[in-house]
Image: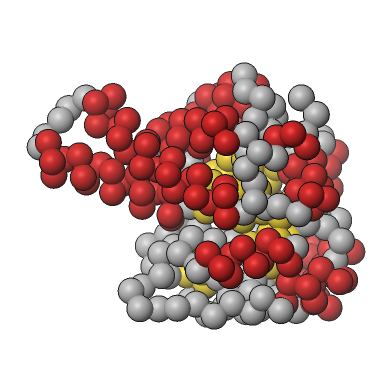
């Protein structure tokens, strides 16, 4: 069941859970996400970064739309970290029901202007828009945009940004980073920023860089009002660990359908752990079927 992000996150906000946004950058990861969502009756967001879309080719979107339209699982097809107006328009033309325009590294006024432009075009055809304010950290080899230095979201700026742009959801920076954290590094999240932003911003709040953070802090972020959490690195790490395990145990194998089932199963374990952590399991019941 294909939804817009606006429809998805309003329900999540009302019932106090967060919807996982999985960067399922291959057909096998899409399969893992759909199988887990159906088994756990959990809504999901299929997130695709522009670099992933280039790799997968536009034709891959037809497979995603088929899965969404032939399943009872509430699902959003979302462009993750769109870097330009043109990328967002291209995604809308392909059938995405939500786009993110990431102007977070632009000056404040330019971020507002770019986001306004995307919102005007997307809303005209019923597509939701996510904006970002503040910057998410970067841990290394990751396709997502980000910086090594985190600029935390200012609540007053968030209020102005939402009012001027009309975005449907806002990605906030509270100390997370994209990718897998280096060994021994413990992120320190400013969870107190969430209720401060929540007091002045009514649209749903989004947390990027959800991989590798302590479960306790992620669960608390949901309690405090986060309604969408992006997970990319964790599910890819699980899947590729499965590939490595298979090849080390069995040696060379040419057939993907022989290698990948165990990798999909390992990936599903991680996906379902995140669904439980975000309080998203069995939340299909809140969506009209």
Scheme by which the image is coloured? secondary structure
Residue 275 coordinates in the image, percent (x, y): 57, 47
Identify the residue at horizontal 75%, vertical 63% (top origin): 225
Residue 276 coordinates in the image, percent (x, y): 57, 50
Q: Quadrant of the N terminus?
A: top right
Name the foreground residue: 57 vs 209.
209
Answer left or right for 46 relative to 76: left
Image quadrant of residue 189? Answer: bottom right
Identify the residue at horizontal 58%, vertical 70% (top origin): 217
Residue 82 coordinates in the image, percent (x, y): 61, 52
For the image shown, how many numbered marks are present on the structure? 0
Q: Is residue 177 positioned above or below 204 on the image?
A: below
Q: Is residue 247 positioned above or below 151 on the image?
A: above
Identify the residue at horizontal 79%, vertical 49% (top origin): 15
Answer left or right for 3 relative to 274: right
Residue at the outermost left position: 251
Residue 1 appears in the picture as rendered: yes
Q: Quadrant of the C terminus?
A: top right
Residue 30 appears in the picture as rendered: no
Residue 136 coordinates in the image, percent (x, y): 57, 70
Identify the residue at horizontal 71%, vertical 79% (top origin): 192
Answer left or right for 186 relative to 8: left
């Amino acid at each position: 069941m294909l939804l817009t992000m606006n429809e998805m996150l309003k329900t999540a906000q009302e019932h106090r859970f967060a919807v996982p946004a999985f960067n399922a950058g291959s057909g096998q990861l899409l399969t893992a996400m759909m199988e887990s969502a159906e088994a756990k009756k959990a809504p999901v967001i299929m997130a695709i970064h522009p670099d992933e879309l280039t790799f997968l080719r536009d034709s891959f979107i037809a497979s995603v739309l088929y899965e969404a339209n032939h399943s009872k699982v509430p699902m959003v097809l979302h462009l993750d970290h769109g870097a330009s107006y043109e990328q967002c328009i291209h995604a809308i033309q392909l059938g995405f029901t939500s786009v993110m325009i990431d102007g977070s590294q632009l000056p404040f006024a330019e971020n507002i202007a770019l986001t306004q432009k995307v919102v005007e075009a997307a809303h005209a055809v019923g597509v939701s828009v996510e904006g970002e304010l503040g910057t998410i950290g970067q841990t290394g080899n990751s396709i997502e945009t980000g910086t090594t230095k985190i600029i935390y979201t200012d609540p007053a700026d968030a209020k102005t940004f939402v009012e001027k742009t009309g975005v449907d959801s806002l990605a906030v920076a509270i100390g997370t980073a994209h990718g897998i954290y280096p060994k021994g590094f413990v992120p320190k999240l400013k969870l107190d920023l969430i209720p401060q932003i929540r007091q002045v911003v009514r649209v749903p709040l989004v947390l990027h860089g959800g991989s590798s953070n302590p479960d306790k802090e992620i669960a608390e972020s949901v309690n405090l009002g986060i309604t969408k959490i992006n997970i990319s690195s964790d599910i890819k790490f699980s899947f590729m660990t499965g590939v490595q395990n298979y090849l080390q145990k069995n040696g060379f194998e040419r057939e993907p359908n022989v290698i990948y089932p165990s990798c999909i199963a390992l990936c599903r374990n991680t996906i379902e752990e995140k669904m439980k952590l975000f309080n998203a399991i069995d939340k299909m019941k809140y969506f009209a079927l």
